Amino acid sequence: MDGKQPSKLSRREMLKLTALTGTSVALGGLGAFTLLKPESNAPNDAKNEGIKKTEKSIPFYGKHQAGIATPQQPFAYVAALDLTTSRRSDVMKLFRDWTSLSFVLTKGEPINTKQDNKYLPPIDTGEALDFSSSRLTITFGFGPSFFMKDGVDRYGLAKHQPKHLKTLPPFANEELHPDQSNGDLCIQVCAENQQVAFHAIRNLTRNALGLATVRWMQHGFLGMKEGATPRNLFGFKDGTANIDTGKEAELDRVVWAGEDEPEWMNGGSYMVYRKIKMFLEIWDRSSLQDQEDTFGRHKYSGAPYGRANEFDAVDMSAQPDNSHVRLAKGTGQEIVRRAYSYTGELDTKTGYSDAGLLFISYQQNPYKQLVPMLKILGQKDKMNEYTKTVASALFAMPGGCAQGQYIAQALFES
Amino acid sequence: MKRIFLITTIACTFLFAAGCSSNTSNGADAANSEKQTVQEVAQENGISSEMKTSVDELNQLIDKLEQAVSTNEMDNVKKQGKEMNSYWLTFENGVRTEFPFEYTEIEKHLQPIYIEAVKEQPNTENMKKEIPLLKTALTELASAKKGTNKASEQLQKAAGEYKTYVLEQSKDLVAATTAFTDAVIKGDMQAAKELYPKARVFYERIEPIAESFGDLDPSIDARENDAEDLAKWGGFHRIEKALWIEKKLDGQADVAKQLMKDVNQLDGLIQNVQLTPEQIVAGSMELLNEAGISKITGEEERYSRLDLVDLAANVEGSKAVYLTVKSALVSSHSDLTEKLDKEFEEFEIALNQYREGDSFIAYDKLDEKQIREMSQKLTSLSQTMSQIANVL
């Protein structure tokens, strides 16, 4: 080019450069989907105030992300996304936008209903406009492939990969579908109203278009009754042994990341997701005795074998060999479970239902607290006759953020 | 004198775009004689002397390319084409920001030349047609004044330019359909099969316009399940079925004659159609929605499996709208145009993997993953395109 030095990098050159080095180059953002200013904290319209009830909303900002220690809501969507952009600045921008969007959504406010240009699509898709926040929580996480994919440190952040964020090892009794497992990013949305939950995940994923694609999305539900442990689709109480999530000291011990983690994980946790298919037709023709032996609990009362009440301490001597309770309890580890049930389409080949459990747990160290449990359950659990794990993922969930900051800011700006 | 010159070059492009090709050589001559006047024009609100140097340099590279084209040295065509493009990349950013209107004109002609030059076998006829237009566009840049084109004027111009595009496509549609229906009437299966996709392209690029004329689109483009009365089902897809499934053309001559009549009628209606900026922007979205609903799913060309031909044509038609409104969009939404340039390019790269000769591989040769990849790129592109209404 006759020795002429380009005075500025062109767009295409800049793209190439960033793709190669993974450095972040501020390009002024991708304004097309900028929804609102990061600090938009405007009070509701007078009109909205009458309709919207925000008193039940769960604060989005805080030391920890909501949706982990939060008492479980009955509906959930979990989605994993794969990033298609190679620029760290794009991902930063995405988290900035997601943070401000999540703040508005969890308050139960419309995203933006003032629109002068009617030729543009509506900014808020609208299906949640008539509902309150419905105790909506939105929780974000990072998978191992966010940091390293195909041996490449994609965003120059591999040095900040959390200690225990490594793809889970294979376990017995699993047959994983790769396209329903893992992923670069995770969003967990929970609410008391399914439509509110769907609205949130829909608008969040829409906001990521062009930067990330949805790898998988799974809905979950949980029949809840005040003061009662919810039951799974096998009809047994599920979550009896959970720790008291109201006690911060318990959470510090079991859930929140340790001090030896990178700074951005301060106040964060690890989420394990296991999609466990239940063979309901087979379960339903098993005797009550068989079913109870499988769990090591009585179906109706929820009491462990040899005891009268649900919350009585487990008597290991009364537990059948290889019962679920015996094996899980035997590891001596604790976790916070936030499991949901799921149902899908009928299997057209067999006529079986597709249903099961979304095992979701939060813990400080999945390799210490959960992997041994999964290993032994995979090998020995009597329940394996009726289940198969079909999808799996591990995500690092960063700590929460204060208003004016955004989720995982300490990671991106480290 | 300079002022007058400026006006005539712009008018020339207008006229040329409308089919007044005799002005081509004037444009080229003007570009050659322009080198002297560039310096004088480059004052006040005009282009900087640095940009002027770049324009001169680019003009020289284009001259070299033109030389290679005229002597048919293909290796050199490729080399010079690449050099021209690389050089343009070194200063296009500045042009885009300061002279969006002129920038669009340059891109409109430079890109086709470049794309042709780097092909395995460049079509030099296309290049010979585009090179003088590119030079004219550069001449316009050399004499441009900042901020002389307001958004509303640009939009009106965009609508006019798009009308020109529609007229061209319609004209080509008539020609290609004539060849296709002639083959059908003659009962020449092989020729008809080859000519079918060539006609489809022009229709799919401007489909929303045809759809705006009530019964014409159903008559030309109905699929089997769209037909109310199968006995009366006609149009492209009826013949498609005869060619690829029934493998005989018995009784198709009448269908072909009716199709030709419909396409001619469409062409007549298009001559007088008035297009507003709102309509063309909506049309660009309709095209992408068509692509996303019936093309990427393989429903449109279910017998010939030429869905990718239609898919490409829908996106090309949508891009034509984008390119005409780009200059109005770029001043206030350069982030958006930048994103769209990138996403169109990415989609084209994804689609081009499946090119085969001057067509595409059959839809049923694609696996689910390949379709998903294209579909996701198309979804991102469409979502971003929905924002071009910001220009209105």
Image: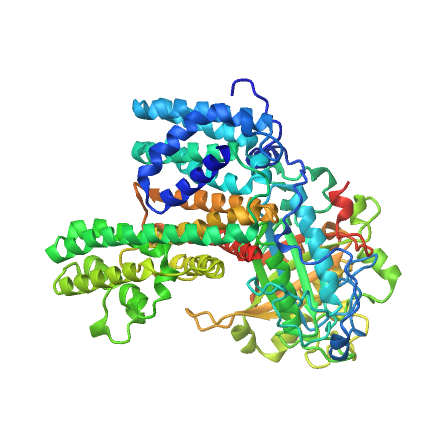
Instruction: From the viewer's side, name the closer residue of B114 and A178.
Output: B114
Specify the quadrant of the image occupied by residue B250. bottom left
| Image x and y of residue A227, in percent | 79, 79
> Quadrant where the C terminus of chain A lies?
top right
Residue in view at x 39 percent, y 33 percent: B27
Tell me: residue A127, above or below residue A22: below
Quadrant of res A23: top right
Residue A141 vs B357, above or below: the answer is: below
Expressed as whole percent of the image width and height from the top left, the position of residue A147 reads 66, 42
Is A236 positioned to the left or the right of B122 in the image? right
Residue B392 quadrant: bottom right
x 63%, y 64%: residue: A116
Residue A182 visible at all = no
Q: In front: A4, or A251? A: A4
Question: How many labels, in total?
Answer: 0
Spot occupied by residue B123 in the image (x, y as percentages of width and height) = 31, 34
The one nearer the camera, A81 or A270, is A81
Left/right of residue B163 with respect to residue A57 in the rendered view: left
Along the line of sight, which residue is nearer the eye, A32 or B168?
B168
Farthest residue to the front: give it: B1
Q: Is residue B283 visible?
A: yes
